[in-house]
Image (spheres, rainbow, N blue to C red):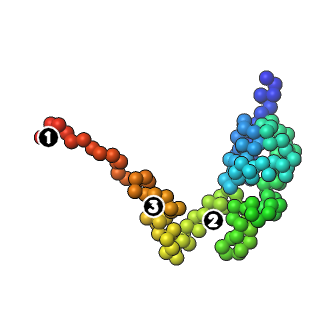
């Protein structure tokens, strides 16, 4: 019972508050741009047990995790980055947090601006990646058949 008092329910890494009741591996996926594989790599770079609860690890380990998240882009090969070839600079980047959201919005706006097929699909609110649209993805109306009222005959 004494260990339950020591748990930190929120651990701040980067600009995100992570859940301290989850394992390090799962909690790191709370950062936007960090998936399961990336979280495993980050925890191994920081020499932290990936199965330990994030709220129970010591402050030194949390500090190592913070530096590993900050240095992740520079330490990985380009094929592991979520933006392997930036449109503007041509360099490999791995974007995290709000940077990822801003760049994605910027990319969609550029596609709209140059009037490419994907940009037009984004603009009209339709499926972008080749999914079927005949029977799924309908919004704004009820799918199905309405029965006629019996009393209006």
| Image quarter of residue 148 | top left
**Residue 149 in the image, given as x and y percentages of width and height:** 19, 39
- 99 or 131, which lies in front? 131
- Graded by Cα atoms within 10 Å as few (under 14), some (14 to 19) or many (20 or more), the crowding at tag 2 reads few
Measure the alpha-carbon separation of dots 2 and 3.
21 Å
Q: Residue at x 69, y 70 (%)?
A: 86
Mark 1–mark 2 CB contact (< 8 Å): no
Q: Disc 3 designates what residue?
A: 126
For the N terminus, the quadrant is top right
Q: Secondary structure at mark 2?
A: helix
- Graded by Cα atoms within 10 Å as few (under 14), some (14 to 19) or many (20 or more), the crowding at tag 1 reads few
- 17 or 52, which lies in front? 52
Q: Residue at x 83, y 54 (%)?
A: 67
Asked if one can make out residue 139 in the rendered structure from this viewpoint, the answer is: no
**Residue 90 in the image, given as x and y percentages of width and height:** 71, 74
151 left or right of 62 in image: left
**Residue 33 in the image, given as x and y percentages of width and height:** 68, 55
Whichever of labels 3 and 1 marks the residue nearer the N terminus, that label is 3
The residue positioned farthest toward the top in the image shown:
1
For the C terminus, the quadrant is top left
Q: Disc 1 designates what residue?
A: 152
Count of number-bearing discs:
3
- 144 or 122, which lies in front? 144
Measure the alpha-carbon separation of dots 3 and 1.
37 Å
- Graded by Cα atoms within 10 Å as few (under 14), some (14 to 19) or many (20 or more), the crowding at tag 3 reads some
């Amino acid at each position: 019972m004494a260990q339950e008092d020591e748990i930190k329910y929120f651990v701040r890494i980067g600009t995100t508050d992570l859940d301290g009741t989850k394992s390090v591996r799962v909690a790191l996926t709370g950062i936007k741009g960090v998936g399961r594989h990336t979280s495993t790599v980050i925890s191994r770079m920081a020499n932290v047990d990936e199965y330990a609860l994030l709220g129970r690890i010591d402050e030194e380990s949390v500090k190592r995790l913070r530096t590993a998240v900050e240095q992740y882009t520079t330490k990985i090969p380009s094929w592991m980055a979520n933006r392997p070839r930036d449109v503007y600079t041509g360099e490999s980047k791995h974007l995290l947090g709000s940077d990822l959201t801003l760049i994605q919005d910027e990319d969609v706006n550029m596609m709209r601006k140059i009037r490419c097929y994907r940009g037009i699909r984004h603009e009209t609110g339709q499926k972008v990646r080749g999914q079927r649209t005949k029977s799924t993805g309908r919004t704004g109306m009820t799918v199905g058949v309405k029965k006629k009222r019996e009393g209006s005959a």
